[in-house]
Image (tube, helix red, strand yellow):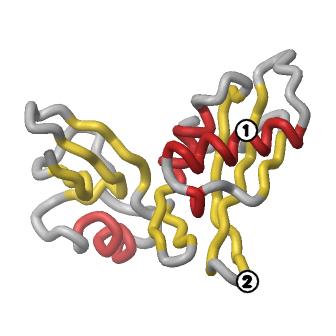
Amino acid sequence: NISGALCISQAWPGMARTIYNDHKRFLETYLTPYPGFFFTGDGVYRTSEGYYQLTGRLDDIINISGHRLGTTEVEDVVNHHVAVAESAVIGYPHEIKGEGAYAFVVLKKDSGYTQETLTAELRELISKKIAKYAAPEYVQVTHRLPKTRSG
């Protein structure tokens, strides 16, 4: 049982080979961090049986009161709420904590939840599953989340 950065030791057919007009950036981003390996940018957990579980982007880390927290961890808990269809969590500058968590939430159709009830339940859920410091100070209900071309 171990966790760390997901790196690949051999080339594969669909592998990127450069960044348009910035090959130096490609080398610095994907090949320099772990020489001899292609760094995917993802975190991974490997079980003693050899199974891999992606834990999210390593660059999507927020630092709340000195605690490094992956936004994917918080999103996973938020998405387990019965009324939530999908979510996105980001860090924002916080005067006391350094960074705070801000959650954008898309509700399932006809969920019947008010903003106040949902916010309270999500804070309680995150406090129990992760820690009190990880609970978002802001929960914003939205109709959809922005997506990249890959989803």
Dot 2 amino acid type: Glu
Q: Quadrant of residue 41?
A: bottom left
Does 91 appear above or below 65? above
Looking at the rendered structure, the secondary structure element under dot 1 is helix
x then y, percent, for residue 26: 35, 67
| Relative to 2, 24 lies left or right | right
The total of numbered circles placed on residues is 2
Does 66 appear above or below 16? below
Q: Quadrant of residue 133?
A: bottom right
Marking on residue 95: 2
The answer for how far apart the CA atoms under marks 1 and 2 are is: 25 Å
| Relative to 57, 110 lies left or right | right
The N terminus appears in which quarter of the rendering?
Answer: top left
| Relative to 137, 8 lies left or right | left
Q: Earlier in the sequence, mark 1 or mark 2?
A: 2
Looking at the rendered structure, the secondary structure element under dot 2 is loop
Residue located at (54% from left, 67% from top): 62
**Label 1 environment density (alpha carbons within 10 Å; few <14, some 14–19, many ≥20):** few
